[in-house]
Every structure is written in structure tokens, then in C-alpha cells.
Image: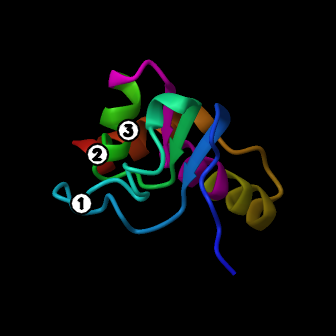
């Protein structure tokens, strides 16, 4: 089965691959078949580096962008709530996560 690229605009491009973990990685799709400028928003599940090649390209094309740090935060928050039965301190967790991941 071959999966083709959309010919027109798309709402979201989602990178759920490991491409982007290395700053030298290229885009996770064939640039001759699809342009990131066709996307309204781009989400890269990678959070380190904060700005992957995909996210840099998407920002330059005017797309809304987000990386995976928020997903990591909310996964941890939900796990803490399950374990403790208490609401997670999201602001504290966000600051600690940003400080430890990005310095």
C-alpha cells in the first residue's frame, strides 16, 4: 500500500517519528511531494531540541507550531493525579520541566 501526499492544504502535520532528534535531520516527508506551507499547523512530538528542522520550516512558512513538551507535561500530570489522587501542580511542573529540559 502506498500512502500519497495531499495535493492541497491540510489542517495539521504531525511528526511522530524520531526524525528531528538530531539537529541535522531533514524533514520527515519528501519535500518534492509536499510543502510545509500547505499546512495550517505543525506539531512535532519531539521536545529536544525545542525547534526541530520541521518546526523551523513551519514557522518560516507562517504555520502555527508546537513541540512535544506540553504532551510530556500533561502525561506526567495525569500520572501524578492517578498515583496520588490529587490535582497536579501544573505551573510548578511546567517550570521544572522547562528548566530541566531547556536549562
Check the image and report above or below for 37 versus 69.
Answer: above
Which mark is first along the chain, 2 or 1? 1
Q: CA distance from mark 3 to mark 2?
A: 6 Å
**Residue that carries the numbered disc 1 in the rendered image:** 25
Q: Which residues are magenta?
A: 60-75
Residue pointed to by mark 2: 53
Quick one: label 3, few (<14), some, or many (20+) residues within 10 Å?
many
Q: Residues within 10 Å of mark 1 (few under 14, many from 20)?
A: few
x then y, percent, for residue 18? 40, 68
Residue 86 locus on image (x, y percent): 79, 50
Work out how far the residue at label 1 is from the one at label 2, CA to CA, in angstroms: 7 Å
Badge 2, how many Cα within 10 Å: few under 14, some, many 20+?
many
Q: How many marks?
A: 3
The residue beneath circle 3 is: 55
3 and 2 marks in contact (CB < 8 Å):
yes
Q: Secondary structure at mark 1?
A: loop
Amino acid at each position: 500500500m502506498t500512502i500519497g501526499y495531499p495535493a492541497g492544504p491540510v489542517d495539521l502535520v504531525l511528526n511522530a517519528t524520531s526524525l528531528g532528534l538530531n539537529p541535522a535531520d531533514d524533514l520527515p516527508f519528501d519535500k518534492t511531494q509536499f510543502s510545509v506551507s500547505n499546512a495550517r499547523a505543525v506539531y512535532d512530538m519531539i521536545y529536544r531540541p525545542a525547534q526541530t528542522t520541521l518546526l523551523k520550516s513551519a514557522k518560516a512558512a507562517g504555520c502555527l507550531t508546537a513541540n512535544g513538551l506540553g504532551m510530556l507535561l500533561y502525561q506526567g500530570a495525569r500520572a501524578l493525579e492517578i498515583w496520588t489522587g490529587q490535582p497536579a501542580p501544573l505551573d510548578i511542573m511546567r517550570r521544572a520541566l522547562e528548566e530541566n529540559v531547556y536549562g
